[in-house]
Image (cartoon, helix red, strand yellow):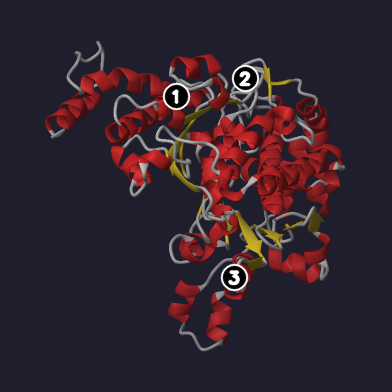
């Protein structure tokens, strides 16, 4: 049994969960008319309403007590001091240092992007490079792609930005369709410079350039690298002045605010990207300095811990009611599940409590017509983070926001069969239509989708994940589970091409599917 499961503070939370289970959200709001204002916090333009979570003041106090006994404040200080918090790999986690005010790491990226947007960065034929394709996978793709979509209303058209991440050749082809190779720049985004997917994409990019520009042309003029291994980029022919560094201590899923954000900076300009960094930095400072009870990322993380580890709810949904945030759930899925999808503590014990939930989501009005049926009437409760943007580039989102508020109400308070019968609904239909309610949700709201507020929102989730990991005593900064499948794939690729025999002991399913796929390759 891990220290968490043995702790008196965790035992108290389990007792509170059992004792308060019979108290519905409806009853909580009736007993406390000011609950909606009392369980609400606004920081740096981001409002967090958690009044529809299954908590009360006593539970919040018990969660804060567990956070203190788990050493959250000390762990937070170690993170910000650049100490070793990634204990399995003996590294610090440096994403907060990367975006601190005055940090020098992005100055070369800014200079390059300014030159690119002025038209001073030329391709092999002497024409300005006006099209950019980001080649990356995981954090080198999901974060920048999400931010690019969120800030597309700021796009001035100076640089067209696209993304490619799929090993399927169709994905690369879709990314380059309609582009002129003479005006196209490829950003090879890989911290290790040995990521299989990015290497394959880079090879396809070089072949695509050569097929149009000719073998004798300097393809290097069309390549930029973002990496922690500049020597490997140099061996691939990418010039030192076109190689931008990312520190080994910045994990991919935390790298949007580093040089990995080059593609976003190219699309929206340096001032907008600096505003994004300011949003990150201000939320960082709030997390570092605010008391736990008034700390937005801490409260978000404590509630997530309560739902997953105490109440044992297996999933969480993130539902943005703004089209610009349509890719946010995908980015947050990697952030949370790659960080906290662990089953071993920092000291090597097997955990005995649930760790990460499954995170999923989609834009709100689409989600309402797909999986909301399960949220309202399914056999398990799924906590929801609703993301509200008061006004978009085209004006207020009144209809979308009305739906957001209505969905949160319906999840919390439901509708009983008796209430339906009172309105004239036949009894058998009333039973089918009844919704149990008492399903937890929060609302995170911002006024507009600005770079500053986007930075604060993403930083909030980053620190919430750290809070949850600290309470669980797991390391959120390694991802060894990502590697094993890649190792196996390296030996299977030649087998699929018929270049080698099956390894000794290969299972019958894998061997059979290799044979089937080989027979259907053409």
Q: Is residue 226 left or right of residue 61?
A: left
- Tell me if residue 332 can be seen: no
> Within 10 Å of the Cα at label 3, are there few (<14), some (14-19), or many (20+) other Cα atoms?
few
Residue at image position (29%, 30%) is: 214
Of the 4 image quadrants, the one containing the N terminus is top right
Q: Tell us which disc is closer to us: 3 or 2.
A: 3
Residue at image position (33%, 47%) is: 177
Q: Tell us which disc is closer to us: 1 or 2.
A: 1
| Disc 2: which residue | 349
> Within 10 Å of the Cα at label 2, are there few (<14), some (14-19), or many (20+) other Cα atoms?
some
| Disc 3: which residue | 394
**Residue 275: x %, y % from top left:** 72, 48
Q: Which mark is residue 108?
A: none
Q: Going from the N terminus, do you reach mark 1 or mark 2 first?
A: 1
**Residue 269: x %, y % from top left:** 62, 47
Q: Are marks 1 and 2 in contact (CB under 8 Å)?
A: no
Residue at image position (61%, 33%) is: 259
Q: Going from the N terminus, do you reach mark 3 or mark 2 first?
A: 2
Q: Gap in Å between the C-alphas at discs 1 and 2?
A: 30 Å
Kindly state the secondary structure of the residue where label 2 is placed: loop
| Disc 1: which residue | 195
Could you say which is closer to the camera, residue 405 or residue 127?
127
**Residue 402: x %, y % from top left:** 61, 74
User: Which of the 4 quarters of the picture holds residue 522?
Assistant: top left
User: Which of the 4 quarters of the picture holds residue 83?
Assistant: top right
Could you say which is closer to the camera, residue 186 or residue 436?
186
Could you say which is closer to the camera, residue 86 or residue 446?
446
Q: Gap in Å between the C-alphas at discs 3 and 2?
A: 52 Å
Q: Going from the N terminus, do you reach mark 3 or mark 1 first?
A: 1
């Amino acid at each position: 049994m891990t220290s968490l499961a043995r702790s008196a503070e965790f035992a108290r939370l389990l007792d509170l969960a059992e004792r308060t289970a019979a108290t519905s959200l409806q009853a909580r709001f009736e007993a406390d008319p000011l609950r909606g204002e009392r369980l609400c916090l606004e920081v740096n333009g981001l409002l967090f309403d958690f009044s529809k979570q299954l908590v009360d003041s006593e539970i919040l106090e018990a969660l804060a007590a567990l956070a203190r006994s788990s050493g959250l404040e000390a762990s937070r200080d170690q993170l910000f001091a650049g100490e070793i918090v990634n204990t399995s790999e003996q590294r610090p986690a440096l994403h907060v240092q990367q975006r601190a005010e005055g940090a020098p790491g992005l100055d070369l990226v800014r200079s390059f992007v300014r030159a690119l947007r002025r038209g001073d960065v030329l391709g092999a034929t002497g024409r300005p490079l006006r099209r950019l394709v980001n080649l990356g996978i995981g954090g080198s793709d999901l974060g920048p792609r999400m931010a690019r979509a969120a800030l597309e209303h700021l796009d001035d058209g100076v640089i067209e930005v696209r993304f490619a991440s799929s090993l399927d050749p169709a994905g690369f082809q879709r990314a380059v369709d309609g582009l002129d190779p003479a005006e196209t720049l490829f950003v090879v985004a890989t911290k290790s410079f040995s990521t299989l997917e990015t290497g394959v994409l880079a090879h396809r990019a070089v072949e695509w350039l050569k097929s149009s520009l000719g073998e004798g042309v300097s393809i290097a003029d069309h390549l930029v690298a973002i990496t922690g291994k500049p020597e490997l980029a140099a061996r691939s022919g990418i010039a030192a002045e076109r190689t931008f560094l990312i520190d080994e201590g910045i994990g991919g899923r935390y790298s949007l605010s580093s040089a990995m954000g080059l593609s976003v900076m190219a699309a929206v300009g340096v001032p907008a990207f600096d505003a994004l960094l300011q949003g990150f930095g201000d939320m960082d400072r709030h997390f570092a300095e605010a008391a736990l009870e008034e700390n937005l990322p801490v409260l978000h993380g404590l509630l997530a811990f309560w739902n997953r580890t105490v109440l044992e709810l297996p999933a969480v949904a993130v539902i943005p009611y703004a089209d610009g945030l349509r890719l946010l759930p995908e980015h947050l899925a990697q952030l949370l599940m790659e960080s906290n999808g662990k089953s071993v503590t920092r000291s090597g014990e097997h955990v005995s409590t649930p760790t990460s939930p499954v995170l999923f989501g989609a834009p709100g009005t689409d989600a309402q017509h797909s999986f909301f049926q399960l949220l309202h009437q399914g056999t398990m409760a799924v906590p929801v983070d609703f993301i509200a943007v008061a006004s978009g580039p085209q004006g207020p989102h009144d209809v979308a926001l009305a739906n957001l508020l209505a969905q949160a109400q319906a999840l919390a308070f439901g509708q009983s069969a008796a209430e339906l019968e009172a309105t004239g609904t036949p009894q058998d239909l009333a039973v089918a239509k009844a919704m149990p309610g008492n399903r937890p949700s929060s609302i995170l709201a911002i006024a507009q989708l600005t770079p500053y507020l986007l930075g604060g929102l993403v930083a909030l989730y980053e620190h919430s994940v750290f809070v949850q990991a600290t309470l669980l005593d797991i390391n959120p900064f390694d991802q060894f589970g990502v590697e094993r499948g890649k190792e196996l794939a390296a030996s299977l690729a030649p087998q699929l091409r018929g270049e080698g025999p099956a390894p000794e002991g290969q299972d019958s399913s894998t061997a059979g599917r290799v044979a089937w796929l080989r027979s259907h390759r053409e």
